[in-house]
Image (spheres, rainbow, N blue to C red):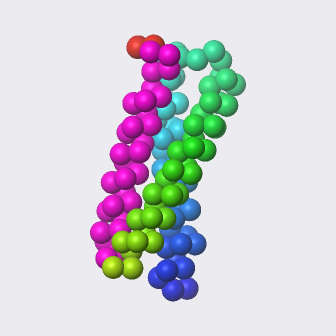
């Protein structure tokens, strides 16, 4: 397996799914701490939809980082992908952490 296949076929999907799962876990913990939402099934469906959006966004980000920067500088591409994923998760949790303006 070449370096391009490794990044495109293995690293990008794993990194995108990991970013989405971390975002979902953090958002679920924030909602659980605030007792926000109607019930567990409503929160689960919302987390599933929000998580799918975050996974797609992270896949696009990692694909761009490894596809454009990766051939030139692999460590810079990994740091770019990691920094972008951390920023995405942080923005995701801060935007969705208090639904309907509810502050705990």
Considering every residue shown, the one lying at the far right of the view is 41
Q: Quadrant of the N terminus?
A: bottom right
**Residue 76 vertical position relative to residue 15 in the rendered view, above or below:** below
Image position of 41 (left or right of 12): right
Range of residues picked out in magenta: 73-101
Q: Position of residue 49 (x, y in %)?
A: 63, 37
Residue occupying the point 62% across, 30% down: 46
In x, y percent, where is residue 36? 53, 17
**70 relative to 22, above or below:** below
Residue 33 visible in rendering: no
In the image, taking residue 69 as reference, residue 35 lies left or right, namely right
Judged left or right of residue 77, residue 31 is right
Question: Which residue sits at x=67%, y=23%?
Answer: 42
Query: Which x, y percent locates residue 96?
Result: 47, 28
Locate residue 47, reporting x and y percent: 59, 33
Residue drawn at (35%, 68%) of the image = 77
Using the image, determine if residue 96 lies above or below residue 49.
above
The reply to whether residue 64 is in sight is yes
């Amino acid at each position: 397996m070449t370096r391009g296949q490794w990044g495109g076929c293995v690293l990008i999907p794993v990194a995108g799914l990991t970013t989405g799962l971390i975002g979902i876990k953090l958002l679920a913990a924030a909602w659980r701490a605030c007792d926000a939402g109607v019930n567990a099934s409503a929160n689960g469906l919302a987390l599933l939809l929000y998580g799918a959006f975050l996974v797609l966004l992270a896949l696009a980000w990692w694909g761009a980082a490894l596809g454009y920067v990766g051939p030139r500088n692999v460590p810079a591409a990994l740091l770019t992908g990691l920094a972008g994923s951390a920023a995405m998760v942080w923005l995701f949790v801060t935007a969705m952490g208090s639904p309907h303006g509810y502050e705990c």
